[in-house]
Image (tube, rainbow, N blue to C red):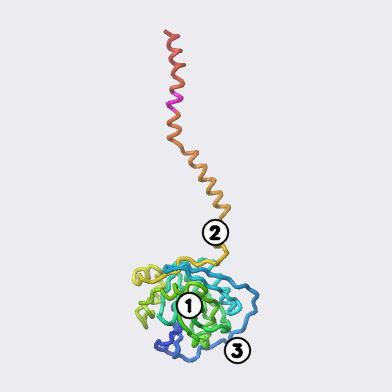
């Protein structure tokens, strides 16, 4: 059965007991935690910034590993992999939050959707501009989806949503993301997560053409990993490309023939005169 990651919605109809979709709501019982609650993880990782280039403009996030070590590490891993490139803000609810993180290529998303990380304690609160991973009502269910809070959603703190980053520039861009589709199906008329997982961006482009997207996500000050791995191969390709034109010059060779023939004519004419 498909796993769906839906963030808690304060005013939504409570999820039925035993439901498998990841839709914790304010009306649900408290989300179960792992035995003893999530254990803190010591980290000496430094803060870093991620630039989200979106269809509405740039959003700059500052990630704090000390807030949510596992969340910050997973986010960096996904950004470096290019996972968030061309990915839609598929669930944008006015006054609540903007959710993103299902890859537009079903094959790519399939590799990550069940690759969960363990919970982190909630150190910071889900205030305006703070960023957390989405999760189900089950412990250790964070994978790839994250959300940016539009307002003060501190009620999510007790449910285990652990902020790992904050918007430091571009909150006006976040506010401008297209939100008319609202809540996702079946509760609302927005995209159905199962449709995105199975059909990717093809489904979204056809049925929900107004959605905004992260065009590219990059770590500030770092070159994309894929670009760093190519220099030698690119040089070889360039050299091969330089040789090709030199080898394939039929026009030049054809143009030389008349000159050679012209140069040979005087000798032939002289030989003919001697015979006469």
Report helix, strand or loop for mark 1. Answer: strand
**Which residue is disc 1 drawn over?**
148
First in sequence, mark 2 or 1: give its number.
1
Return the x and y of residue 183 as percentages of the image width and height. Answer: 38, 80
For the N terminus, the quadrant is bottom left
Of badges 3 and 1, the one in the foreground is: 1
Q: Quadrant of residue 68?
A: bottom right
> Residues under labels 3 and 2: Cα distance?
43 Å
Return the x and y of residue 174 as percentages of the image width and height. Answer: 45, 74
Count neighbours of disc 3 (C-alpha within 10 A) and say few if under 14, some if 14 to 19, many if 20 or more.
few
Q: Which mark is residue 35?
A: none
Residue at image coords 57%, 59%: 228
Return the x and y of residue 35 as percentages of the image width and height. Answer: 59, 88
Which is nearer the eye, 36 or 25? 25
**Which residue is disc 3 drawn over?**
36
Does the magenta-highlighted stretch encompass residue 254? no
Of badges 2 and 1, the one in the foreground is: 1
Residue at image coords 54%, 45%: 239
Q: Quadrant of residue 124?
A: bottom right
Residue at image coords 42%, 82%: 95
Asked whether the viewer can see residue 106, the reply is no
Residue bounds of the magenta highlight: 257-261
First in sequence, mark 3 or 1: give its number.
3
First in sequence, mark 3 or 2: give its number.
3
Residue at image coords 46%, 70%: 103
Q: Which mark is residue 227?
A: 2
């Amino acid at each position: 059965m498909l796993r769906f990651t839906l963030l808690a919605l304060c005013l939504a109809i409570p999820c039925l007991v035993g439901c498998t979709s990841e839709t914790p709501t304010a009306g649900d019982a408290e989300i179960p935690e792992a035995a003893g609650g999530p254990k803190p993880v010591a980290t000496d990782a430094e803060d870093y910034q991620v630039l989200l280039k979106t269809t509405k403009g740039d959003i700059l996030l500052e990630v704090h590993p000390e807030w949510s070590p596992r969340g910050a590490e997973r986010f960096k891993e996904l950004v470096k992999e290019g996972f968030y490139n061309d990915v839609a803000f598929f669930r944008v609810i006015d006054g609540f939050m903007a959710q993103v993180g299902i890859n537009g290529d079903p094959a790519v998303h399939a590799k990550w959707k069940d690759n969960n990380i363990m919970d982190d304690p909630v150190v910071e609160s889900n205030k305006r501009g703070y960023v957390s991973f989405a999760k189900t009502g089950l412990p250790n269910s964070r994978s790839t989806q994250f959300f940016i809070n539009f307002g003060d959603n501190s009620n999510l703190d007790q449910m285990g949503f652990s902020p790992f980053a904050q918007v430091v520039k571009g909150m006006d861009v976040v506010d401008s993301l297209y939100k008319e589709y609202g809540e996702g199906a079946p509760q609302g008329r927005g995209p159905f997560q199962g449709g995105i997982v199975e059909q990717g961006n093809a489904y979204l482009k056809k049925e929900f053409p107004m959605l905004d997207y992260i065009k590219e996500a990059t770590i500030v000050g770092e070159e994309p990993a894929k670009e760093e791995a190519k220099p030698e191969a690119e040089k070889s390709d360039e050299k091969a490309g330089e040789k090709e034109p030199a080898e394939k010059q039929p026009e030049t060779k054809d143009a030389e023939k008349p000159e050679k023939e012209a140069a040979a004519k005087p000798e032939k004419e002289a030989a003919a005169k001697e015979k006469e």
